């Protein structure tokens, strides 16, 4: 079974075909920038959820600085949007981005930052007044939010198809990262936590590592959820949607409760990798032993030749001394490395 194409591969293909498709360039980069901003918004929302009920001034400053940086990226993106879409204005209803609570498990510590807690109560926001203070929840102007027949001219339809392809790549990448993170969590659970139940508390390194991976699982799951929702809005066919199934919360916990077989399989692969690594290292060391002795022997031959060619007695005596020294080095090397090396090198 062929591996699903990554977003980078799809982006390369679309960029190469961009000029020939509708005579415009820069649209793919614009779409990628929008997707990256969505991911940055998700990261910021997650950071806010993880804050304590009473964040320090330093923590609040970090959040506000991230908001300002994100807001600057959004403004720049919207300026580019006007160029890419020939100045077309958004006609859809402005909405807010929401994260499924089942895909945010273990994140919520407190919502003591202005904006996000009040917004999620009713889902409504006057973006003209509040978007600057809450850029992490404001939606961007992209084709996936304007997919109506009234605006489907040739340029917009081409952009919509390009975004659909990129969203497939985004979903593929998310699933690949999700699969890896779930495997990592299973290994940690069985190797570290399950084997030592007496250390199950937040202060242990294993539990913190498990929480870190859980946050990564949440992130990849939300990204997949967003990409699939966008594919639906862009009118993806039934075969495409069937390939990208709805991701449920229970799908993220199967591997952490599975048989230890997966852990043993991963351990075997790790052990084999270590064996191959040290086998190669052993061969290198054995060759280095041989090269060292050969270097000593070569020096002995060179100084012996110099002694034979010397005319003055002093020069000959010095060369004979060097010859003897290198011969002793070679003999000591052979004695020390006996049984540990191969002279085939």
Image (spheres, rainbow, N blue to C red):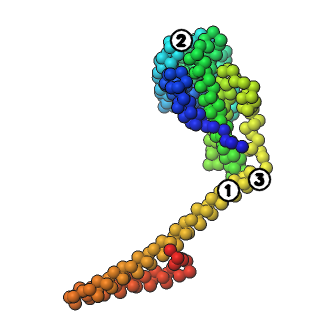
- Give the quarter of the figure containing the N terminus: top right
Categorize mark 2 by other alpha carbons within 10 Å: few (<14), some (14-19), many (20+). Answer: few
Q: CA distance from mark 3 to mark 2?
A: 56 Å
Q: Is residue 238 visible?
A: yes
Residue drawn where x is 54% and y is 29% of the image: 17
Categorize mark 3 by other alpha carbons within 10 Å: few (<14), some (14-19), many (20+). Answer: few
Q: Which mark is first along the chain, 1 or 3? A: 3
Q: Which mark is first along the chain, 2 or 1? A: 2
Query: Which residue is label 3 attached to?
Result: 261
Provide the secondary structure element on which disc 2 rests: loop
Residue drawn where x is 56% and y is 69% of the image: 282
Instruction: Identify which residue, 255 or 191, lies in the foreground.
Output: 255
Residue drawn where x is 53% and y is 21% of the image: 22
Where is residue 202? Give x, y as percent: 65, 43
Query: Which residue is label 2 attached to?
Result: 88
Provide the secondary structure element on which disc 1 rests: helix
As drawn, 49 above or below 185: above
């Amino acid at each position: 079974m062929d591996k699903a194409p990554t977003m980078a591969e799809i982006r390369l293909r679309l960029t190469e075909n961009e000029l020939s498709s509708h005579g415009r360039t820069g649209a793919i980069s614009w779409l990628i920038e929008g997707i990256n901003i969505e991911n940055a918004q998700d990261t910021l929302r997650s950071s806010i959820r993880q804050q304590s009920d009473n964040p320090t001034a330093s923590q609040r400053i970090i959040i506000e600085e991230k908001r300002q940086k994100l807001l600057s990226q959004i403004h720049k993106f919207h300026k580019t949007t006007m160029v890419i879409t020939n100045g077309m204005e958004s006609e859809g209803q402005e909405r807010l981005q929401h994260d499924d609570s089942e895909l945010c498990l273990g994140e919520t510590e407190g919502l003591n930052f202005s904006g996000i807690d009040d917004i999620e109560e009713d889902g409504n926001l006057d973006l003209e007044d509040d978007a600057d203070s809450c850029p992490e929840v404001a939606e961007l102007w992209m084709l996936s939010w304007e997919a109506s027949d009234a605006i489907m001219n040739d340029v917009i339809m081409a952009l919509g198809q390009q975004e659909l392809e990129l969203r497939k790549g985004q979903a593929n990448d998310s699933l690949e990262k999700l699969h890896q993170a779930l495997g990592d969590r299973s290994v940690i659970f069985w190797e570290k936590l399950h084997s030592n139940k007496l250390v199950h508390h937040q202060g242990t390194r294993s539990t913190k590592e498990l929480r870190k991976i859980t946050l990564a699982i949440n992130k990849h799951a939300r990204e997949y959820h967003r990409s699939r929702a966008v594919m639906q809005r862009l009118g993806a066919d039934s075969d495409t949607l069937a390939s990208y199934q709805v991701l449920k919360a229970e799908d993220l916990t199967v591997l952490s409760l599975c048989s230890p077989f997966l852990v043993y399989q991963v351990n075997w692969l790790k052990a084999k990798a270590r064996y191959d690594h040290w086998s190669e290292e052993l061969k290198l060391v054995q060759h280095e032993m041989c090269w060292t002795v050969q270097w000593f022997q070569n020096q002995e031959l060179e100084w012996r030749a110099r002694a034979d060619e010397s005319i003055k007695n002093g020069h000959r005596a010095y060369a004979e001394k060097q010859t003897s020294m290198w011969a002793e080095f070679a003999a000591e090397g052979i004695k020390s490395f006996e049984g540990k090396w191969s002279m085939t090198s």
